[in-house]
Amino acid sequence: MSLPKKLLADFDEVLKDRGYQSRSKGIRDALQDYIVRYQWMNSMEGQRIGIVTIIYDHHYTGVMENLAEIQHSFRNEINTSMHIHMTDKYCMEIVVVNGDIAEIRDLTERIMRLKGVEHVKLTSTANGEEFSEPGHSHDHGYHHH
C-alpha cells in the first residue's frame, strides 16, 4: 500500500496525539471505522434529508464540470447547494439533499470517486415524514396560556 507522504505524516501526528504505540494498530482502527461508517450508510433505508459536504481542488482539470454534471443528474434529490472558496486551491460545496437514501448514497459515492475531490461526508436523518403520524405528540414543551 502506498500513501502520500503528507497523509502519512498527518496520520502519524493523529496517532501520536491519541497515544497510539503502533502505526499498524492505528491503521487497523482507521480501516475498521471506515468499514463501520460505510455499513451504517448502507443500512439506512427510506426517505432521508441531509447534507453532503464536499471539499475539492478547483484547479484539478474537469472536477467542477464533473461535480455539476453529477448534481444535475440528481436534481430531484438536491434541494440547494452552497459554494465556499476556502483557499486558493480548495473549495467546499455544501449540498442539501432530500429523498430516497439509495439515490442520496449513489450521489455521494459518485462524488467520492471523482478525481480532484479530497473529502466527502454525508450527514443525514429521517426527513420528518414520521413526525406527522397519528399519535405523535406535538407538545414540545411550549405552553400557550
Image (tube, rainbow, N blue to C red):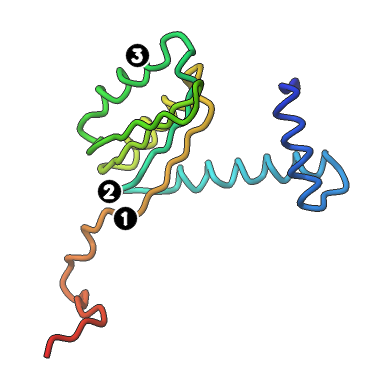
Distance from Cα at disc 2 to Cα at disc 1? 6 Å
**Residue marked by disc 3:** 65
Q: Earlier in the sequence, mark 3 or mark 2?
A: 2
Distance from Cα at disc 3 to Cα at disc 2? 28 Å
- Of badges 3 and 2, the one in the foreground is 3
Which residue, as the protein is rendered here, is positioned at the far front? 88
Q: How many neighbours does mark 3 have within 10 angstroms: few (below 14), some (14-19), or many (20 or more)?
A: few
132 or 69, which is in the foreground? 69
Asked if disc 3 and disc 2 are in contact, CB closer than 8 Å, the reply is no
Image point (78%, 45%), residue name: 15
The percent position of residue 80, horizontal first and vertical second, equals 24, 37
138 or 17, which is in the foreground? 17
Question: Eyeballing the image, is 45 above or below 64?
Answer: below
**Residue marked by disc 2:** 47
Q: How many neighbours does mark 1 have within 10 angstroms: few (below 14), some (14-19), or many (20 or more)?
A: some
Image point (53%, 27%), residue name: 118
130 or 96, which is in the foreground? 96
The reply, left or right, for residue 14 in relation to residue 43 is right
The reply, left or right, for residue 64 in relation to residue 31 is left
Q: Earlier in the sequence, mark 1 or mark 3?
A: 3
Q: Amino acid at mark 3?
A: Glu
The percent position of residue 38, horizontal first and vertical second, equals 53, 41
| Quarter of the rendering occupied by the N terminus | top right
The reply, left or right, for residue 34 in relation to residue 23 is left
Image point (45%, 8%), residue name: 61
Q: Amino acid at mark 1?
A: Ala
The percent position of residue 107, horizontal first and vertical second, equals 36, 30
**Residue marked by disc 1:** 126
Q: Amino acid at mark 2?
A: Gln
Q: Earlier in the sequence, mark 2 or mark 1?
A: 2
Q: Secondary structure at mark 1?
A: strand
Question: Eyeballing the image, is 88 above or below 133?
Answer: above
